[in-house]
Amino acid sequence: MKILGVVGARPNFVKMAPLLREMARHPIIEPILVHTGQHYDREMSERFFSDLEIPPPDVNLAVGSGSHARQTAEVIKRLEPVLVERRPDVVIVVGDVNSTFAAALTAVKLGIPVAHVEAGLRSFDRTMPEEINRLLTDAIAQFLFVTEESGRENLLREGVAPQKIFFVGNVMIDALEILRPKWERSSVFDRFGIGSGSPYAVLTLHRPSNVDREEALEALLAGLAAFAREIPIMFPVHPRVRSRLNGRAEIHWAKEGTEARLPAEGILGADPLGYLDFLALAGRARLVLTDSGGLQEEATVLGVPCLTLRANTERPATVTYGTNRVIGTHPARILEEGRKALAAPRSSGKRPPLWDGKAARRIVQVLLGDQR
Ligand code: UD1
């Protein structure tokens, strides 16, 4: 059975790693890995392959950056001949990035069944590019693997046949658990001069709605800078955000060639971190502030309070079971909720059902037609 997995962007690598590891346990499966090249910087791509122990891709489409239309179109154009030549029995796509939808569309038009891992999540905000990718991918996939109950409900409401939907848990949590012994040994704390008891927060930002509009970014930074007087904030910066932040007084950058040391207060901007270093850092944080989807889930399992800097979440299980609070982007609200989180006794929340590190196993069993 030939199973071809497609990855393109940073969170895809995390989700595909446990699937590849599981497939390797079944000699009947011939896995093929295609990297679209949507993310290509060493720190956004190669570093993740090595941290997550993913073998080099069999094919790299090298599409690179571009407008949404261009990027999506390039993946479709370049993937089609690969699928025609390799003729996989199933194509697995993960998450909600442009590469996910582009690959699903290409496969389905060639009559190849598509398995979507992390199906059914909905923010109900169609201005988010990811929401469009999710809706379209789910509409054409044959196997819809959901991470949480809301995913199943959303798909049923959209008219998806129940027999196509499989509630299997969360492969991102599989990765976190498989690599726990490695990330627990990370040296990231020494590199940033963070002592074992010293409190800090971790920040990530990359959503277009937060960083592409000057006004929105301005407001966010005002709130974050005010909060950073209470606790220092470590901010590994996504490359799309870097140029917008250069020269901002709210952020201290490590000078090139010098050690980046987390100050007693304020925001320390840093290059993007690898998977292992980032999880180690998030795991010991007093709280995380983020607009990422995956980090809301990781914080839930790490038992670290998470303040989501968005108006909505497509991952409601992180709120009902986990440590997540969706607080929006108003500066006063960031300060207020941040203070509240610091004052509250630490409660680790609960794991959502089936976030037990065995999602990849369940998925591969379904694909092999063995649903024990
Ligand atoms: C993409 C996904 C987003 C996901 C995120 C994780 C879409 C629509 N968005 O957003 O859902 O949460 O990945 O990081 O697919 N860039 C580099 N080096 C890289 C990659 C990107 O410098 O290796 C810069 C380029 O300026 C590029 C910009 O980041 O134009 C945006 O990259 P792109 O892949 O289009 O979207 P992300 O913002 O990374």
Image: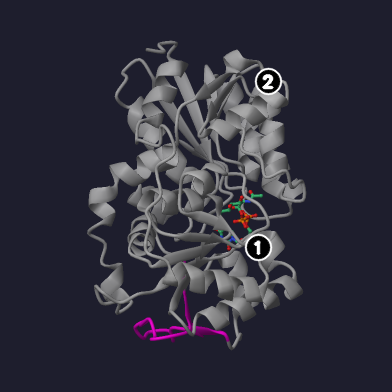
Amino acid type, label 2: Val
Amino acid type, label 1: Gly
Question: Looking at the image, how many numbered discs can be counted on the residues?
Answer: 2
Looking at the rendering, which quadrant does residue 144 occupy?
top right
Q: Per the image, is 249 magenta?
A: no
Tell me what residue is drawn at x 43 percent, y 42 percent. Answer: 172
Is the residue indicated by label 1 positioned so its CB lies within 8 Å of ligand 1?
A: no
Q: Is residue 324 above or below residue 2?
A: below
Image coords of residue 29 (percent x, y)? 38, 19
Callout 2: few (<14), some (14-19), or many (20+) C-alpha neighbours within 10 Å?
Answer: many
User: Which quadrant of the rendered structure holds the N terminus?
Assistant: top left
Q: State the mark number for residue 107.
A: none
Can residue 78 be seen here? The reply is: no
Foreground tag (2 vs 1) = 1
Secondary structure at badge 2 equals loop
User: Which quadrant of the rendered structure holds the C terminus?
Assistant: top left
Image coords of residue 202 (percent x, y)? 45, 68
- Disc 2 target residue: 160
Q: Magenta segment, which residues? A: 250-272
Image coords of residue 27 (percent x, y)? 31, 18
- Disc 1 target residue: 328
